[in-house]
Image (cartoon, helix red, strand yellow):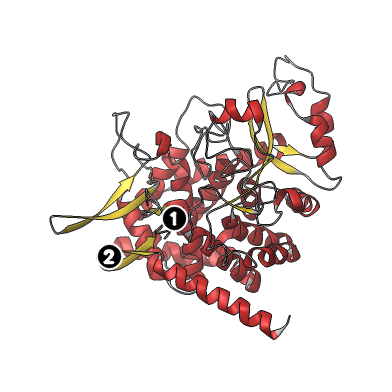
């Protein structure tokens, strides 16, 4: 690489850091998060708030740089916003939920944090993923700092248990996966992902692993047992029923319908004619595969959802063989899944009558835009983490090279439109915080692969568990 190129890249990184610094939100004089975007040309709506899912990429980046105070403050303040009492009011958030976002508000000289659990959001979507991302960031904080004092405080232990009780509650459902409505995750608008979407299952699995480590000491054995019971069946369920490659496609193609009883092969009663199997036959490479977007009664959503697949690799929800196959697919279908801006949130887009019926004619989710086939630079850090995990660094380096050639000139947009991601999103905010953090974090993970354990949810060692439990006993004794 030429010296001039190195200087340009360094300048880009410095500008990105300067932009990220401007997004930091302060509450009572302390940094507590980052606002979603700093685009002063449009109405702020809720982009001037700190979103739990948005902050995770910034939070991990701050941890890598040793700026742990902002992450600790964020975890402490958002935990205080968690409802601790059972609510029978259908319009109030349930016990254990973490809000979608929050903002600092001043009233009569008093400053407080105002939480949004979806009651102000467009379409009033429920933030199911917030508590899962919160757990993931808490584990990253402990892994980075070895600061058990935070996670083992009684209020944190109680908060973690409430999240686990919410996720592991007795329910009507008969699957190990988590049942959620449409719009409950990063795709927070109607896109036909109600039921058991892959993104939520990948985050759920990672959060369970994080919670198990943080609850492993005295007094939590019942929840630890529940987690231990759920993890293997969830993993087996996803690896078997969500997996699609040519061998699996052949098996599905020959499915019989209307099977009854425990011996049924087609357990979800998938009707083959509902699947685009000829398109899949052309699109799937011989050595590639991926986890389906959703599985449910008579439903196999064969769209490729990037976040769910990348997080499945990072968290070991996908097997080693499946992880390599997913990376093979990304490499072989680079123009479809990455194109001119890493990376496409879902492929392919819903079009024509399917778009109108499933999205409700959503003008923001027109084909190849926003959630419906748009390209989201924030996904770069997950691609980088998956590349480090699978030893496919060259794919992440290629993606970073593509992104950094455009993002600064395009003013760090939220997302890109078009089949190849060549168009700045029609309604994309500029100076989107997680776009900036996504690039910086991707570069950090590639340059410092030793930081991967912050996001790969590796279990604590026996020595770490012993030290943590000793700390917990000492803290309770005092």
Judged left or right of residue 119, residue 446 is: right
In the structure shown, which secondary structural element does the residue marked by tag 2 occupy? loop
Asked if residue 457 shows in the view, the reply is no
What residue lies at 44% left-to-right and 43% top-to-bottom? 164
State the image quarter where residue 261 is shown.
top right
- Quarter of the image with the N terminus is bottom right
Rendered location of residue 298, percent (x, y)? 66, 22
Work out whether residue 434 or residue 351 is closer to the camera in this orientation and state it: 351
On the rendered structure, is 405 left or right of 73? right
Q: Is residue 419 above or below residue 454?
A: above
The reply to whether discs 1 and 2 touch (Cβ–Cβ < 8 Å) is no
Residue 190, given in percent of the width and then of the height, sits at: 52, 33
Report the residue marked by disc 2.
Answer: 478
Residue 356 vs residue 273, the one in the foreground: 356
Disc 1 crowd rating (10 Å Cα; few below 14, some 14-19, many 20+) is some
For image coordinates 82% across by 26% down, the residue present is: 253
Label 2: few (<14), some (14–19) or many (≥20) C-alpha neighbours in 10 Å? few
Among the two numbered marks 1 and 2 on one chain, the one whose residue lies closer to the N terminus: 1
Q: Residue at x 51, y 53 (%)?
A: 210
Closer to the camera in the image, 1 or 438: 1
Q: What element carries label 1?
A: loop
Location of residue 113 in the rendering, given as x and y in whole percent from the top left corner: 27, 53
> Is residue 349 shown to the viewer in this render?
yes
Q: Quadrant of the C terminus?
A: bottom left
Instruction: Name the residue carrying label 1.
Output: 217
Which image quadrant is residue 240 in? top right
Q: In this view, does 359 lie above or below 285?
A: above
User: From the viewer's perspective, is residue 459 above or below residue 92?
Assistant: below
| Residue nearest the observer in this picture, 77 or 31 | 31
Marks 1 and 2, how far apart in space?
17 Å
């Amino acid at each position: 690489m030429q010296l001039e190129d190195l200087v340009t890249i360094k300048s880009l990184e410095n500008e990105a850091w300067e932009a990220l610094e401007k997004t930091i939100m302060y509450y009572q004089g302390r940094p507590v998060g980052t606002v979603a975007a700093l685009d002063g040309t449009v109405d702020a709506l809720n982009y001037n708030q700190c979103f739990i899912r948005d902050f995770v990429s910034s939070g991990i980046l701050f941890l890598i740089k040793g700026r742990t105070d902002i992450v600790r403050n964020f975890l402490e303040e958002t935990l205080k916003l968690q409802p601790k009492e059972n609510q029978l009011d259908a319009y109030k958030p349930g016990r254990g939920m973490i809000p979608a976002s929050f903002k600092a508000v001043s009233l009569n000289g008093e400053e407080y944090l105002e939480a949004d659990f979806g009651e102000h959001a467009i379409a009033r979507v429920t933030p199911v993923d917030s508590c899962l991302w919160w757990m993931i960031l808490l584990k990253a904080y402990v892994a980075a700092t070895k600061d058990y004092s935070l996670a083992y405080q009684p209020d944190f232990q109680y908060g973690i248990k409430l999240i686990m009780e919410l996720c592991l509650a007795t329910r009507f459902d008969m699957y190990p996966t988590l049942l959620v409505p449409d719009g409950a995750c990063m795709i927070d608008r109607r896109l036909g992902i109600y039921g058991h979407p892959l993104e939520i299952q990948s985050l759920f699995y990672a959060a369970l692993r994080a919670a198990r480590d943080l609850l492993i000491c005295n007094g939590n054995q019942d929840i630890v047992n529940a987690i231990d019971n759920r993890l293997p069946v969830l993993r087996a369920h996803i690896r078997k029923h969500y997996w699609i490659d040519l061998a699996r496609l052949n098996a599905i193609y020959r499915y019989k319908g209307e099977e009854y009883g425990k011996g049924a092969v087609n357990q979800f009663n998938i009707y083959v004619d509902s699947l685009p199997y000829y398109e899949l036959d052309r699109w799937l490479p011989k050595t590639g595969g991926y986890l389906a977007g959703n599985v449910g009664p008579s439903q196999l959503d064969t769209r490729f959802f990037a976040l769910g697949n990348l997080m499945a690799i990072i968290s070991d929800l996908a097997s080693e063989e499946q992880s390599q196959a997913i990376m093979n697919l990304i490499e072989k279908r680079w123009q479809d899944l990455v194109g001119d801006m890493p990376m496409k949130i879902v492929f392919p887009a819903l079009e024509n009558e399917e778009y109108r019926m499933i999205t409700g004619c959503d003008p923001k989710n027109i084909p190849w835009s926003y959630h419906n086939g748009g390209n989201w630079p924030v996904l770069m850090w997950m691609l980088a983490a998956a590349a480090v995990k699978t030893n496919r660094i060259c794919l992440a380096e290629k993606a970073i090279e593509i992104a950094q050639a455009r993002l600064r000139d395009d003013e760090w947009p939220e997302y890109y439109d078009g089949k190849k991601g060549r168009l700045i999103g029609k309604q994309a905010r500029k100076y989107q915080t997680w776009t900036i953090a996504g690039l910086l974090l991707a570069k950090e993970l590639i340059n410092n692969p030793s930081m991967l354990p912050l996001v790969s949810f590796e279990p604590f060692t026996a020595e770490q568990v012993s030290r943590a439990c000793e700390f917990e006993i000492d803290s309770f004794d005092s």
